[in-house]
Image: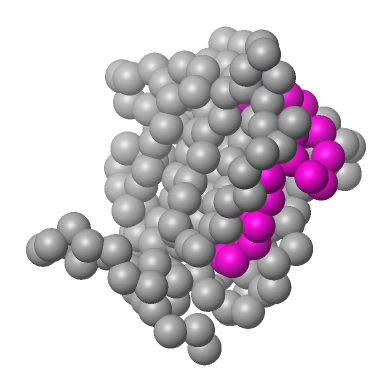
Amino acid sequence: TPSTYLSHIGGEEFLVLEGTFKDQFGEFPAGTYVRNPIDSVHAPWVDDDGCTIFVKLLQMADTGEGTTPLHVNLAHAKTSAVQHDFGQVAELYQNPKTGECVEMCWIEPNQQLPILPGAEGGEEFFVMTGSLQCQDVEYSKWAWLRFPLGSPVPERQTVTAGSEGAQVYRKTGHLTEKSLSMEKIQIDFETEALKATATN
C-alpha cells in the first residue's frame, strides 16, 4: 500500500517493463507508458514480486500542461496505430509548444526504420522487445540509443529490426535548444547543480 507521496518538480515519464506499477490512480502492468507532469504528485508502490521500469526524470519542459497524469496501455494503443511499410507507429504524447513527440513503433523483422518526421530535433530509442541493428552493432531488449539533432548521421540510416522484429519507444524534438531551454530543471554543467526555473 502507498506510504509516501512524491512530488515531481521536473516531471517523470516511464515504461513499465516487468511486474505491475501501482499508485493512487490505478494498477499499471508491463506494457504501460506513464507520464507524470511537472509538479504532479503520486504515491507509488509495488507488490513483493517487484517491478522494473525505464524512467526519465527532470527532463520536462514547463509549458503549463497541468498535473494530470497520462497512462497509455500499449497493447490498446497498437490497435489504432498508423500502418507503414515497415510496421506500425502509435503516438503516445505530443507537445506543440516544444515539438517533443513520444511514439511506440512496432517494426517488422529485418525491416529498416526510416528517418521519420521529427528526427531533425534529436531522436532517442529504447528497445522494449526484439532487437535493433545499427551498422555492425546489435541493440537487444532494453538497449537505449540516442542520435543528435540536425541532419541524420550515417549510422541512423542503418537502423533495422532484427530477425524477430522490435517494439521500440521513440522520442523526438526534445533535444532542440528551444525545448531544452524550457525545461523546468536546468543543469549547470560546470557545477553539476540543479536549478528550477521560474514558471512562465
Q: Position of residue 108 (x, y in %)?
A: 67, 24
Q: Residue at x 67, y 74 (%)?
A: 65
Q: Position of residue 78 (x, y in %)?
A: 82, 36
Q: Position of residue 47 (x, y in %)?
A: 71, 19
Left or right: where 182 falls relative to 44? left
From the viewer's perspective, is residue 91 above or below residue 112? below
Name the image quarter holding residue 74.
top right
Q: Position of residue 181 (x, y in %)?
A: 37, 76
From the viewer's perspective, is residue 116 above or below residue 114? below
Left or right: where 121 falls relative to 8? left
Task: Write down the region rendered in magenta.
Answer: 17-43
For residue 178, say whether it is visible.
no
The number of callouts visible is 0
Which quarter of the rendered picture does the N terminus lie within? top right
Q: Residue at x 63, y 69 (%)?
A: 95
From the viewer's perspective, is residue 59 above or below residue 135? below
